[in-house]
Image (cartoon, rainbow, N blue to C red):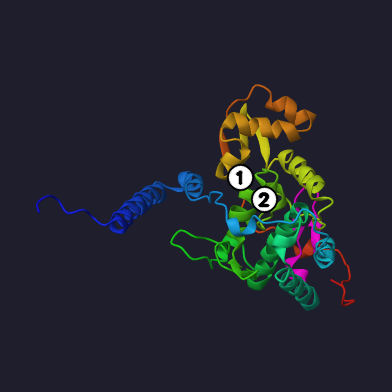
Amino acid sequence: MGGTARIPDFLSEAASASRSWLCLLSLAALMFLSGPVNAGALERLFAPKPELWSFWVDHNPTSTIDVDHSVWDQFLAHYVHAGDDGIHRVRYAGVTPAGRGALGRYISELQQVPVRQLHRDEQLAFWINLYNAVTVDIVLQYYPVQSIRDIDISPGLFAQGPWGKKLLVIEGQRLSLNDIEHAILRPIWRDPRVHYGLNCASLGCPNLQQRAFTAEDASELLDAAARDYVNHPRGVRVNAGELHVSSIYSWFRQDFGGSDAAVIAHLKVYALPALAEALRGFDNIADDDYDWALNAQMASVRGAVSDETGESN
């Protein structure tokens, strides 16, 4: 028989995937060689997309299970300081062995929770608290560091930070911080306010709250966190007639409507009167930026407080 032999599907797909990766690698190399001006564009290129992990869709609307977040609540009240500049910082250097032990036990206990048997509101609080607690715990394991991105334990050529490493096992599934954010919270809730609840241990990030989320107050806390961030200069600012925003509105643009106009409309929902007036007339965003410096409180501004061991810091 004559004719051209057909390339097997899996080889064709592999070749296509290889070409795609080569294109991405070439583009990334060009951005890198062209200097720091394109650093933000590179981050946007590799920002994770929401991809639903269907295993976690199940929930029980009639569930009466209440997850206990009191240990995390106490940790936050004790170690998170609200600065005069509007940024919450963590006293990583002041966390005692007892405090670290309590945090570790809390994370271990959360991994025993039958998450898919919870109702939706309980699940939302569960995932946000777990994400934030694990983030603090991983920083404590490597502290002192200048940035969480220095904790380079994620797999992958372009990976930075701890977000891609499988750190948890829940209901038999191994999960990373990326899984919690991009495969569970973003695609299941489809609520841009989720970004204001998650903290990545950086000064540019929405604040780590001083109390734990609960099923009863999660929505209220997310609204408050959104207002706090949108009305802070690291979230939104107008300079010389141009609108500058946090890079989260670029990295996760589709969550905020998919366009500059949609992002601005979102900002107006939470803007206080002064910012709302400043936003009038804008239909495009000039630039975005983000401060990856660790959200660590300096020793000079620590308060003398005692924790569950009776120690004073």
Residue in view at x 68 percent, y 65 percent: 134
Magenta stretch in the rendered image = 79-95
Secondary structure at badge 1 equals: helix
Name the outermost residue toward the left. Answer: 2
The local crowd at label 1, few if under 14, some if 14 to 19, many if 20 or more residues have their Cα within 10 Å, is many
Name the outermost residue toward the top. Answer: 281
Residue 10, numbered circle: none
Q: Amino acid at mark 1?
A: Ile
Looking at the image, residue 67 lies above or below residue 248: below
The reply to whether callout 1 and callout 2 are in contact (CB within 8 Å) is yes
Residue 248, numbered circle: 1
**Residue 26 falls within the magenta-colored stretch:** no
Nearer-the-camera pick, 221 or 183: 183
User: Label 1, label 2: how many angstroms apart (C-alpha)?
Assistant: 8 Å
Looking at the image, residue 16 lies above or below residue 255: below
Earlier in the chain: of badge 1 and badge 2, it is 2
Q: Name the quarter where the N terminus is drawn.
A: bottom left
**Residue 90 falls within the magenta-colored stretch:** yes
Residue in view at x 59 percent, y 64 percent: 176
Horizontal arrangement in the rendering, residue 73 relative to residue 58 (left or right): right
Looking at the image, residue 44 lies above or below residue 103: above
Nearer-the-camera pick, 3 or 20: 3
**Does any portion of residue 154 appear in the rendered image?**
yes
**Does any portion of residue 296 appear in the rendered image?**
no
Residue 205, numbered circle: 2
Nearer-the-camera pick, 238 or 250: 250
Picture quadrant of residue 94: bottom right
Looking at the image, residue 137 lies above or below residue 233: below
